[in-house]
Image: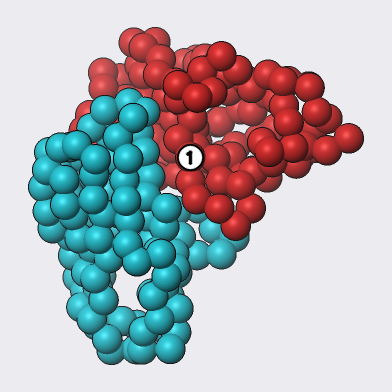
Chain colours: A cyan, B red
Amino acid sequence: DIQMTQSPSSLSASVGDRVTITCRASQGIRNDLGWYQQKPGKAPKRLIYAASSLQSGVPSRFSGSGSGTEFTLTISSLQPEDFATYYCLQHNSYPDTFGQGTKLEIK
Amino acid sequence: QITLKESGPTLVKPTQTLTLTCTFSGFSLSTSGVGVGWIRQPPGKALEWLALIYWDDDKRYSPSLKSRLTITKDTSKNQVVLTMTNMDPVDTATYYCAHSSGGSAHHPWGQGTLVTVSS
């Protein structure tokens, strides 16, 4: 299985801050990676696909980058509605695997 | 617009078999490249991918759960069914289904259904 190591596991930040979350794959996955946002009691919502493509309807303050084994999700200016848990997911080879999540909290 | 909805029991006893149904609209599972997958999330924990079935009946399973899982589809009813045998309290989780197409995996998701395993 491909292991996805996501960091940090939690992050405290303020409205307006720039935030970066990282996922490292245990082997190369090209750009077969998505980023998801999950709010309490809700299903995950995809923000980024193919490592760097913004899902339709998602604010442009979200961006993704990377290829191969190292990937980042950046939120350029945190808004109150962005406080949630974020997951990366690789779908390069089965089984698909998720990162352990990053809980983004208000400072 | 693609929508998916999970249904099934909210409570199962240990050793029983769980059967969950994903009913979807806005796409067809007879279209080339399309698939439907299942993912679960124990309370307060991370997401875990379980299985996926494609339009051509190709099936993929999590190796750690493969012996307990079966995924099937009914194209005429727009449904995908996941069965999990020998349920245990550690299988307590919210179970989600999600659409996949071509290189675009797991989008969108259903709302999820919480399954509790307890005697």
**Which residue is depicted at the point 30% across and 35% down?**
A2
Say which of B32 and B50 sits in front: B50
Can residue A43 be seen by looking at this rendering? yes
What residue is rendered at 83% in x and 38% in y? B118
- Does A79 appear above or below B36? below
Q: Quadrant of residue A63?
A: bottom left
Is B1 left or right of A54, judged from the image as shown? right
Above or below A75: residue B80 = above
Label 1: few (<14), some (14–19) or many (≥20) C-alpha neighbours in 10 Å: many
Circle 1 sits in a helix, a strand or a loop, which is it?
Answer: strand
Residue A105's quadrant in the figure? bottom left
Q: Position of residue B5 (x, y in %)?
A: 56, 39
**Residue extending furthest top?**
B57
In this rendering, position of residue A105 left or right of residue B5: left
Q: In which quarter of the image is the N terminus of chain B?
A: top left
Residue B24 visible? The answer is: no
Dot 1: chain letter: B
Q: Position of residue A3 (x, y in %)?
A: 32, 40
- Which percent across, then down, holds residue A51? 17, 50
At a point 39% along the width and 10% down the height, the residue shown is: B57
Q: Which residue is drawn at 56% across and 14% down?
A: B67
Q: In which quarter of the image is the C terminus of chain B?
A: top right
Residue B37 spot, x, y in % from top left: 44, 30
Residue type pointed to by label 1: Glu
Q: Does residue B94 sit above or below B67 in this rendering?
A: below
B117 or B109, which lies in front? Answer: B117
User: Does residue B41 appear left or right of residue B85 in this picture?
Assistant: left
The residue tagged 1 is B48
